[in-house]
Image (cartoon, helix red, strand yellow):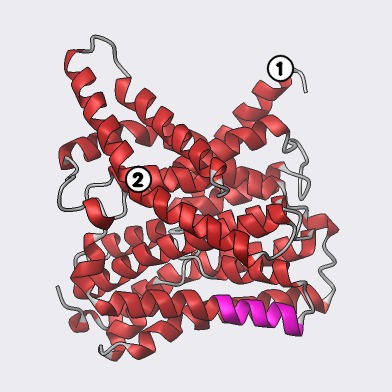
Amino acid sequence: METHIFFLHLVIILIAARVFGEIAARLTAPPVIGELFAGIVLGPSLFGWVEPTDIIKLLAEIGIILLLFKVGLETDIKRLATAGCKCGIVAITGFTAPLVLGFSISFWLFSIPMLESLFIGGTLTATSIGITVRVLGDLNLGNSHEGDIVLGAAVLDDILGVMLLALLYEFSIGGGINWLNAGKVLLFIVAFFILAPVLAKLMSLIIKRIENFSETSGLIPTMIVSLVLLFAWLAHIIGAPELLGGFAAGLALSRRFFLPLGATLRTDAKFALNIKRQMSPIISLFTPIFFVLVGLSINLREIDWSSAYIWLFSLTLFTVAVFGKMLGVIFIRESGASRALVGMSMIPRGEVGLVFAELGKLSGFFNNETHAGLIIVIILTTILPPFGIKWIQKHYQYAFRK
């Protein structure tokens, strides 16, 4: 592709992502859904104006690494302690049930190969903490008792999801399931998460010192992006997906450290908020490219919509995705309204589910039909739950505790 054509395509992607994201937000749907539809409109499914070239894929990968950095940065491990064991029950059950059910149905009912079925099950485990936080905040439930359970569970869900993603990545590059290599990768990841806060803390101290006498602007975003890319490289070296590095960097720089260094290496909350403020424009620039790329990689014209398979596959996985998350609330001692709110809040897949689905597609495990079926499930589980949450809050507002 010639340079000027690439510039034109990039202009189209950025503007379309913004326009469709804005439309989605005004329709009370998550902007990420609008960005996904922008890719569908621009790609082979409709107009075919833009192709997912290697350069666009590289920009999209930077975008998803920065997105996972943002997820890690906004993660507050204190939520786990505040909500107690209830968030653990909700998270672990809501993680395990969709994984097992999604894998079992894909493998036994639809005769999909084992590794591909694992990717499908992994996609169904995701919970979008960003969408959940946004909806609960809009309803003034972010600081409620139920909100603590949901956000604590979502934090744990994110950590478990990233670990699973690293395992699936290892299986994909290894061409099959090798539990010995998987065990080594997990050990490397644990060591990585233990050492990451130390490295991030040291770099943050250096950045703050340099910032005090620096006479040029843009120091923080430059250094933080460098740190994120360094962590992405380190993650690749240990055999994990690069986006794990972005998540670890964000988690290490978040307002609250975790693991054994929490008591001694406390993060400066003001500095963490300053990082978030200065990094937001960069993240907002790159991450939409990833979601547009997901839409570009789907070709809805190649799918036989008259086939019962695609509808049965999507409907079955949608049922599993909803039931698997709602199952976790059965085991906690709360009122019916509180259980319904917590369970409904855990359903949205959003950007996290798209990461799993796209990794499966890029690894060559998902054909166009399977990938499209998963995208349908992710869209439905992202759009519908916010309306359910609002309905529950409206009809049972008296039941929720601050």
Q: Amino acid at mark 2?
A: Leu
Q: Nearer the viewer, mark 1 or mark 2?
A: 2
Given residues 90 and 15, the one toward you in this image is 90
Quadrant (top left/top right/bottom left/bottom right) for the C terminus: bottom left
Asked which secondary structure carries label 2, the reply is helix
* Image-quadrant location for residue 145: bottom left
Total numbered badges shown on the rendered structure = 2
Q: Amino acid at mark 1?
A: Thr
Which residue is rendered at x = 49% and y = 60% of the image? Answer: 163
Q: Is residue 294 left or right of residue 139?
A: right
Q: Mark 1 vs mark 2: which is more N-terminal?
A: 1
Residue 99 at x, y = what percent? 56, 75
Query: Which mark identifies residue 195?
Result: 2
* Image-quadrant location for residue 195: top left
Q: Is residue 108 magenta?
A: yes
**Residue named by callout 1:** 3
Q: Is residue 130 magenta?
A: no
Query: Which mark identifies residue 23?
Result: none
Q: Give the residues in magenta.
A: 99-109
Residue 48 at x, y = what percent? 78, 40
Q: Is residue 202 above or below residue 393?
A: above
Given residues 7 and 243, the one toward you in this image is 243
Q: What kind of secondary structure does the magenta stretch mostly adopt?
A: helix
Query: Furthest residue to the top?
Result: 215
Whole-number angstrom distance, CA of label 1 to CA of label 2: 41 Å
Residue 227 at x, y = what percent? 40, 32
